Amino acid sequence: MKPPFSIKGLHHYAFRCRDAEETRHFYEDLLGLPLVHVIKADHVPSTGEYCPYVHIFFEMADGSCIAFFDLGDNQKALPSPNTPSWVNHIAMQVDTVEEIEAAIRRLREAGYEVLGVTDHEFVKSMYVFDPNGLRFELTTHTGSPAYMEDARANAHHLCQEWTKSKRQLESK
């Protein structure tokens, strides 16, 4: 059943950060995402809870944002103990592999350990942990239209296959 609304795209995705300025430097100075909005408050609007914070937004070319909360305690979010560090990440898109290579050089010059260029068949990517321990991926499409059409056509089938095999393993 189709929902009675239409999601148009990502507005923002928010994470906790240790330090707003350190985070600003990474996303604005190194990655080129402009800081476009800052909210400073003492109470959480949705809950009314007292918690002084600053909420910072960095804009991507499509108008969507990545955002962070600095809670003023110099703490970054703790990793999940049941999830490998490579699982939770945010991926942002560029147009070319050359742009990924330029980002790798820039981040390495700034002292970051970068993995990549990694070939995933349909995209090529690089990976780096930001100052908050968030895994950041920069990626570009490399798959042919035929590859992507085939992937879309087989997505539900492959998901169902995975679910079936996972359940078989769980029952043993």
Image (tube, rainbow, N blue to C red):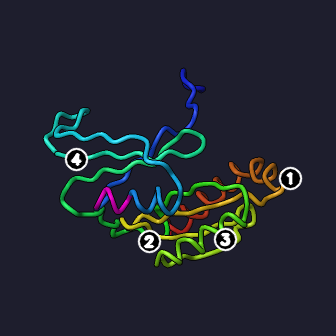
User: Reading the chain from its start, which is encountered first: label 1 or label 2?
Assistant: 2
Q: CA distance from mark 3 to mark 1?
A: 26 Å
Q: CA distance from mark 1 to mark 4?
A: 47 Å
Say which quarter of the image contains residue 84. bottom left
Q: Specify few, some or many for label 3: CA neighbours under 10 Å numbering under 14, 14-19, or 20 or more.
A: some
Query: Where's residue 36, x and y in %?
Result: 43, 42
Q: Which residue is mark 1?
A: 146
User: Reading the chain from its start, which is encountered first: label 3 or label 1?
Assistant: 3
Type of amino acid at the residue the image marks with label 3: Glu
Q: Residue at x 49, y 38 (%)?
A: 11
Query: Where's residue 163, x and y in %?
Result: 58, 57
Q: Which residue is mark 3?
A: 101
Labels 2 & 3 near each other (Cβ < 8 A): no
Q: Residue at x 18, y 59 (%)?
A: 73
Type of amino acid at the residue the image marks with label 4: Tyr
User: Reading the chain from its start, which is encountered first: label 2 or label 4?
Assistant: 4
> Which span of residues is magenta-colored?
19-23
Q: Residue at x 44, y 62 (%)?
A: 26
Say which quarter of the image contains residue 7. top right
* Mark 4 secondary-structure assignment: strand
The answer to whether residue 56 is left or right of residue 121 is left
Q: CA distance from mark 2 to mark 3?
A: 26 Å
Labels 4 & 3 near each other (Cβ < 8 A): no
Say which quarter of the image contains residue 75. bottom left
Q: Specify few, some or many for label 1: CA neighbours under 10 Å numbering under 14, 14-19, or 20 or more.
A: few
Q: Nearer the viewer, mark 2 or mark 3?
A: 3
Q: Which mark is residue 53?
A: 4
Q: Quadrant of the N terminus?
A: top right
Q: Which residue is mark 2?
A: 84
User: Reading the chain from its start, which is encountered first: label 2 or label 3?
Assistant: 2
